[in-house]
Image (spheres, helix red, strand yellow):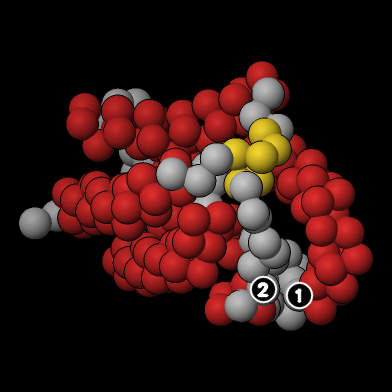
Amino acid sequence: MSLVVAGKALWVLLVVGWYVLRVPFQRRSKRTRISRDAKDMTERLRLTVSTIGLGVVPFVYVATGWPHGASYGPEPIFFLLGILAAIGSIVLFRLTHKALGKMWSVSLQLREGHRLVTSGIYGTLRHPMYSAFWLMALAQALLLPNWVAGPAGLVGFGLLFALRIGPEEKMMEEAFGEEYRAYRSRTWRIIPYIY
């Protein structure tokens, strides 16, 4: 099996793994009513751009090889690093969902009885779900040797992250006040001891 085919297969496994991990939490969270919803047109646009970069563009490449002219020869070290990033993203994704439980939401929403989660992975990182997505986007860039499909996730998710992190933290501060400010002062956004 060539590294190109193996990279494509691993990307598919990564996406399927994320879906399998997310579905039970998505079902469970839907049973808890939303008390605050900031899912406006801007948020929908951010989610669409991220989905195109992390899903649509790489899927087209995996299924068809398009854009053919943007492909390059895979490097074994990139493939190995892609595997490590994929494993890290799956582990982190699972930890975040487990810690959030029914408080989880795909968008900027708060559930009835929402509490600030500060345990588990959230004891160190305020946004470990974003860390998991960054690792997923990095895995995509390393596993798919194509100058368009590979980095599309970094670009798509990068835009979502850059445009959403401020409004999300503002919403959390408005909802939890001093508790959130204290939590923010003792944790990192997405990378321990760096950012």
Residue 38 as seen in the image, left or right of residue 31? right
User: Where in the figure is residue 145, as x and y percent of width and height?
Assistant: 35, 47
Q: Please give the name of the residue rendered at 68% of the width and 24% of the height, measured from the top-left corner.
A: 40
- Depth check, front residue: 190 or 37: 37
- Depth check, front residue: 124 or 8: 124
Specify the quadrant of the image occupied by residue 87: bottom left
- Depth check, front residue: 152 or 37: 37
- Find disc 2 in the rendering and name its residue: 118
Q: Please give the name of the residue rendered at 67% of the width and 73% of the height, measured from the top-left corner.
A: 118
**Label 1 residue SS:** loop
Residues at marks 2 and 1 touching, judged by CB atoms closer than 8 Å = yes
**Label 2 residue SS:** loop
User: Where in the figure is residue 187, as x and y percent of width and height?
Assistant: 76, 75
The answer to whether residue 81 shows anywhere in this view is: no
Split into 4 quadrants, where in the image is the C terminus?
Answer: bottom right
Disc 1 marks a residue whose amino acid type is Thr
Disc 2 marks a residue whose amino acid type is Thr
Count the marks. Answer: 2
User: Where in the figure is residue 168, as x and y percent of width and height?
Assistant: 74, 46
